[in-house]
Amino acid sequence: MFRTIADPDPSEFAGKRVVVTGGSRGIGAAIVQRFLDGGATVVATARSATSETPPAASFISGDISSNDGVRAFASGALDALGGVDILINNAGAARAYPEGIDSIPDEEWQDALDLNYLSAVRLTGALLPALREAGAGSVVVNISSGTALSPQGPTAHYGAAKAALANYGKALASELAPAGIRVLTLTPGNVLTPGADAIRQAIADTMGVTLEATTAGVPLGRAGDPRDVAEAVVYLASDRAQWVTGTNLVVDGGELPTF
Ligand SMILES: NC(=O)c1ccc[n+]([C@@H]2O[C@H](COP(=O)([O-])OP(=O)(O)OC[C@H]3O[C@@H](n4cnc5c(N)ncnc54)[C@H](OP(=O)(O)O)[C@@H]3O)[C@@H](O)[C@H]2O)c1
């Protein structure tokens, strides 16, 4: 079980303008809440808000899987915040194809790239002038996935898109470092959220095992809680990590066999 940590410093992100994609539920909602707890002003987006969406954030509904959708959201976020200091590219999803790579339709590869990779590339590009204006100390965090490091057939389209995201983040980090803008990748392992549970259920059904079995065997003894990821994100986005850029931080309870 997640052990509640000491109260966050309510002034750590005071004055910071934060954008979180996929902030309606799951990991994104926990990230939004954690920045709010740290005193930030936050704009979140997703296609629809849920009961999990933190009400203290501004919520802009929209679909960021197209360039037009990204541009509309970027413009709305800048209108709401007047600028941006921290961008968290968290929106992502996958449909599992338990029969393997050969069963993944062509359009699904494109959809996976559009949402899990290109939405982050496009949004970062759209907000880059604002991030440059905010200057040294501004931060981009891209949320990848353990499947990018440990690929599996049923989600190969998604894993490839997330691997591309990490590769892109490393290049962007080098390019923006002279401006003092940091770019990080965070790679979660199995975290209990509505979206990930649906994928794991599809895989469990095919394997004839329970949903719980898909997250058994984590060395630290449990699957992740969205707040585990949110804590790592706020560390990476904070001045506590001011000499950290281009890094891929794995947050997985020790599950991935690689590093
Ligand atoms: N949970 C895990 O085990 C795990 C592991 C590795 C990586 N990740 C990554 O972590 C991130 C968060 O995952 P999660 O588990 O919290 O997933 P989730 O519960 O399904 O939440 C996904 C978020 O993305 C939004 N989203 C999906 N499609 C969108 C679109 N076209 N336009 C705008 N927003 C969209 C969703 O809202 P709407 O559907 O309303 O748009 C929701 O806010 C994702 O990038 C995921 O790939 C998760």
Image: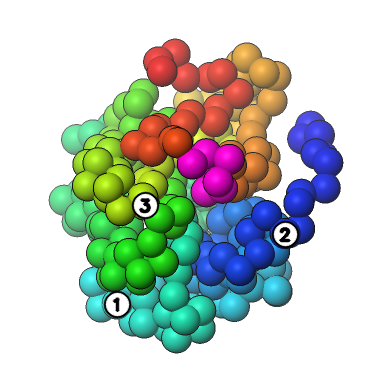
Image side of residue 227 versus residue 164, left or right = right
Q: Earlier in the sequence, mark 3 or mark 1?
A: 1
Circle 2 sits in a helix, a strand or a loop, which is it? Answer: loop
At label 3, the amino acid type is Ile
Q: Earlier in the sequence, mark 1 or mark 2?
A: 2
Say whether marks 1 and 2 touch (CB < 8 Å).
no
Q: Earlier in the sequence, mark 2 or mark 3?
A: 2
Give the residues drawn in magenta, as a range: 236-242
* Residue identifier under label 2: 11
Give the number of the mark in front: 3 or 1: 3
Residue at image location 49% in from the left, 70% down from the top: 45
Circle 3 sits in a helix, a strand or a loop, which is it? Answer: loop
* Residue identifier under label 1: 71
Closer-to-camera residue (64/134): 134
Whole-number angstrom distance, CA of label 2 to CA of label 3: 21 Å
At label 1, the amino acid type is Arg
Give the class, few, some or many, for how many residues have Cα within 10 Å of label 2's Cα (few <14, many ≥20). Answer: few
